[in-house]
Amino acid sequence: MSVAVVTDSTAYLPPEPVRAHRLTVVPLTVVLNGAEGLEGVETFPADATRILGGRRVSVSTSRPSPAQFVTTYRRLLADGADGVVSVHLSAELSGTVAAARLAAAEVGDRVEVVDSRAAGMGLGFPVLAAATAAETGADLAGVRAAALAAVDRTTIFFYVDTLEFLRRGGRINAAEALLGTALSVKPIMHMPDGAIVVRDKVRTASRGVARLIDLAVEAAAGADVDLGVHHLAAPQRAQQLVEALTARFGDRLHDTYVSEAGAVVAAHAGPGLASVVVHRRPT
């Protein structure tokens, strides 16, 4: 049997590639006003959007436990996998990678853990690269290398309507959030080395979408690309992005994955999120 590939629920891959590549997805936990649920299993984007739009807002997220990963890895190996490559949400944002590494140390040297240094399809593209390598017969080291190479070829940008949710979750500092609010700035973020950093500031949502398009084209650096597009309660923004980028890239654009961000990202970014992930195809 080939190497099995594991990821977590923040990859926000559409269901089709998850089934086609036989991926194993371990969910994070979201707590919305005291109600706890597994992301994508018990708690969905609409649940988070509803809570975040209310007056009383209490939202938190937590990583899968090491025990969950141990159970997952042992099951896959018992089912005949030669090894497991486990690719996860940035260690700068979550303890998920740390939990997976603790589990891998317990299970043994047939499990490798990769930090994607991203979320959404910034995680999803390395997962797909790992799965493709596994399907073509790569060994454990080869599948891990494919995931790491894809990490280096993937760039994520996202627009949020407000910095408030990122501030509440501790993903940016309070001074930066207050400055943005005072100036009515709408930020565009990116994730160099896995941390969330303000990349640009715009005044309107329409300028935010336009800037995302330009940044995506710049990030492609003339290469053929795949795209990931996410939104949260903003499908029209996702559609704008897809249409504009399809036109800008032309024949250089291959696969496009569109999905709504889940409750974990919703808790920290808030409704109105629009994101573009650029994966440069290897030459």
Image (cartoon, rainbow, N blue to C red):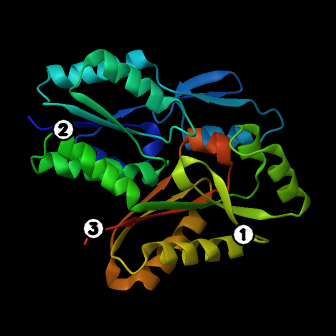
N-term mark: 2 or 1: 2
Q: Quadrant of the C terminus?
A: bottom left
- Residue 267: image x %, image y %? 65, 40
Q: Is residue 218 above or below residue 89?
A: below
* Residue furthest to the right: 182
Q: Amino acid at mark 3?
A: Pro
36 relative to 202 in the view: left or right: left
> Could you say which is closer to the camera, residue 208 or residue 144?
144
Q: Amino acid at mark 2?
A: Leu
Name the residue at 63% across, 75% down. 211
| Residue bearing mark 1 | 205
- Residue 186: image x %, image y %? 76, 63
Q: Amino acid at mark 1?
A: Ala
Q: Is residue 144 above or below residue 94?
A: below
> Could you say which is closer to the camera, residue 177 or residue 79?
177
Q: Secondary structure at mark 1?
A: helix
| Residue bearing mark 2 | 140
Q: Secondary structure at mark 2?
A: helix
Nearer mark to the viewer, of 2 and 1? 2
* Real-space CA distance between mark 2 and mark 1, rounded to the nearest whole angstrom: 44 Å
13 relative to 236 in the view: left or right: left
| Residues under numbered marks 2 and 1 in contact, where contact means CB atoms less than 8 Å apart | no
- Residue 59 is tagged as none
Residue 7 can be seen in this image: yes
- Residue 252: image x %, image y %? 33, 80
N-term mark: 3 or 1: 1
* Real-space CA distance between mark 2 and mark 3, rounded to the nearest whole angstrom: 20 Å
273 relative to 64 in the view: left or right: right
Q: Quadrant of residue 30?
A: top right
Name the residue at 47% across, 36% down. 40
- Residue 282 is tagged as 3
